[in-house]
Amino acid sequence: MNSETLISINGVYRYYGNYCAVNNVSFTVERGEVLGFLGLNGAGKSTTMQIISGVLSASSGAVSIAGFDIMDAPRQAKSQLGFLPEQPPLYHDLTVDEYLDYAARLRGIRRTNIRTVIEKSKQRCGLETVGQRLINNLSKGYQQRVGIAQAILHAPAVIILDEPTNGLDPVQIKEIRELIKELGRDHSVILSTHILPEVQTICDRVLIIHEGQLVLDRQLENINEGKQNNIINIAFRQAPSLDTLNIIEGIKHIDQISDQQFRFELHPGSAAIDHIVRNSAASGWGLFEIIPETGSLEETFMRLTSGEKENL
Ligand code: ADP
């Protein structure tokens, strides 16, 4: 394993009865990465997050955190991990300080360190002035900050946030997103969400999950690359082999999507399209579709969650 890989998920399945909610999911997260885990409601995000966090067991497959297997070495694995579930585990009749003190003890943080750890966590989450307030009396945005503060108390290498901005108003959403971005400087973060702009503003990399399966794993800058129309989808009735297409000048990379469809990544400014069209006419490939990808995350998301599968 690469020394910078903090999370490794390998062939994970999760069944609820006969229903396969997570279907052969594999990916890794590197140190310092903010990964967006994007999918429609019901796609399998929470189930995957809970499996990574060790809250739920996988039906099969393996998860390791900082090299520790979540099943074989759960204590070590969880010591490297902070989790904010979709429903934050808050005690509404405690004050913020009381709750964080309780969470720190649960985490096994040494008594002599607890005060320092709580102060640091509160400061990072903008909670300095509300330590004495009852959690019940805080706004939802502040309650979410408390949830994040408990997740980072033990300075974990990895933070998992499941739909952290759900139910917040626009100002609170903005504040929580800024906080997550800030956390991304020192931790690896997985952010599960169904909100596209959230991923666009916060994340370095995006995974899209659809009906339990990963359909995209890509750096965000590569998605935006398509904006220069360097990514073109082309379909032929009598498609040539991939080898034949690969020798055409100006092509950086080709993914074969189906028997007839190909996704071409072109060198910027190249005349590759002209060459493809000319070759097709000369060799009878029957080119019938040529669609530049605008490459926005929204377009990619819409395309992939309507059933089509990108080559991973
Ligand atoms: P997401 O977080 O992307 O909205 P979930 O992981 O919560 O998706 O759910 C994935 C699928 O698994 C959904 O179809 C959901 O109905 C189903 N599911 C989730 N939890 C359970 C459960 N405890 N029992 C049965 N089905 C479940």
Image (spheres, rainbow, N blue to C red):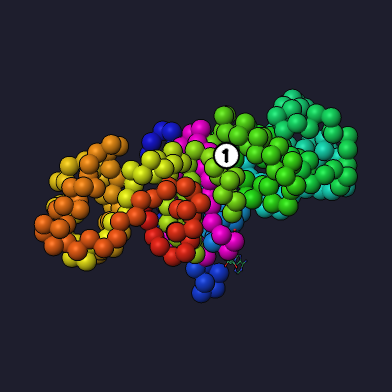
Q: Is residue 41 magenta?
A: yes
Question: Neighbour class for label 1 at 10 Å: few (<14), some, many (≥20)?
Answer: few
What is the x, y in percent for residue 293? 39, 50
Compared with residue 78, is residue 41 higher up or lower down, i.e. above or below? below
**Disc 1 designates what residue?**
201
Residue lying farthest to the left in this orientation: 282
Indicate left or right for 46 with 63 as reference: right
In what element is the residue under mark 1? Answer: helix
Along the viewing direction, whichever of 276 and 253 lies nearer the viewer: 276
Name the residue: 32% across, 50% down. 232
> Foreground: 175 or 53?
175
Q: Which quadrant does the N terminus fall into?
A: top left
Question: Could you tell me which residue is drawn at 22 percent across and 44 percent down?
Answer: 272
Q: Taking 269 as reference, is 46 left or right?
A: right
Residue type, numbered disc 1: Thr
Whether residue 259 appears in magenta in the rendering, the answer is: no
Dividing the picture into quarters, in which one does residue 224 lie?
top left
Q: Nearer the viewer, residue 213 or 17?
A: 213
Q: Position of residue 282 (x, y in %)?
A: 11, 57
* Magenta-colored span: 21-42
**Image-quadrant location for residue 99:** top right
Quadrant for ligand 1 reads: bottom right
Please report the residue visible at 74 percent of the width from the left and 41 percent of the height from the top: 171
